[in-house]
Image (cartoon, rainbow, N blue to C red):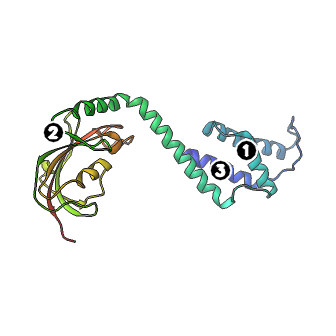
Amino acid sequence: MKTIKNLAMATSFLAIVSCNNENVSVTSLETELDSASYALGMDMALKVKSNFTDAKTSAFIQGYKNVIDSTNMLMKEDDIAGFLRTFFQKQQMQQAEKDAKKKFAAVKEAGEKFLAENKTKEGVTTTESGLQFTILKEGNGAAIKPDSKIKLHYHGTTIDGEVFDSSVDRNEPYESRANIFIPGFNEGLAMMHVGDKYKFFIPQELAYGVQQRGELIKPYSALIFEVEILELLEE
């Protein structure tokens, strides 16, 4: 957010500063106004240089001139703030993902190795998306639809067996729609019926991906859930 704020300030300065259009190279600062104008230019450049090293100087200068001249603007003034906010949020997320890939490469590798070995075990089925599951108990109740309201028990662990969340341990069944969870969990529920008990082995890309969720669920963690559908609830 600091990046967005700094560059938004620089953009605001562009809209209020006035200057002539002559291509004059300033070599000395004769007046206080000269110094203030030059300092403002330096301030904007430093913000861009420190926060956006990939900025194209030619486009930056053209945008500056177009605002000063109020002519030939390639973007509406009302769109500037929203565009910059979205752009730099995307940049920050990409950088966070890049950093996480380095820091948690071992977590990702361990999950991939575990799933590669697990898929060869008897009773394990792998879906097209990469979700793996085993059927622990078959029920004979109604099928679960994505928008079904259900009561279920779940027991979530890491691939090392550490429990990060469990309605079973709390002895408190969970009630919810069947489509509000992580993608792998949602996909698994859609295959189940009331009375079924499945075990899901969820790849990181169908779980939380680059996000860290508490102490145990690190970025790129593969997850395991045992899930039992207890009841289909009435609306």
Dot 2, how many residues are within 10 Å of its Cα: few (below 14), some (14-19), or many (20+)? Answer: few
x and y percentages locating residue 32 in the rendered image: 83, 45
Dot 3, how many residues are within 10 Å of its Cα: few (below 14), some (14-19), or many (20+)? Answer: some
Dot 1, how many residues are within 10 Å of its Cα: few (below 14), some (14-19), or many (20+)? Answer: few
Q: Is residue 170 above or below residue 121?
A: below
Q: Which mark is residue 9?
A: 3
Residue at the (86%, 43%) spot, across then down:
31
| Real-space CA distance between mark 3 and mark 2, rounded to the nearest whole angstrom | 59 Å
Q: Which mark is residue 123?
A: 2
Q: Is residue 142 visible?
A: yes
Q: Is residue 92 left or right of residue 18?
A: left
Q: Give the residue type that dot 2 points to.
A: Gly
In the depicted view, which residue is nearer to us: 43 or 59?
A: 59
| Real-space CA distance between mark 1 and mark 3, rounded to the nearest whole angstrom | 18 Å
Callout count:
3
Mark 1 highlights which residue? 59
Q: Earlier in the sequence, mark 2 or mark 1?
A: 1
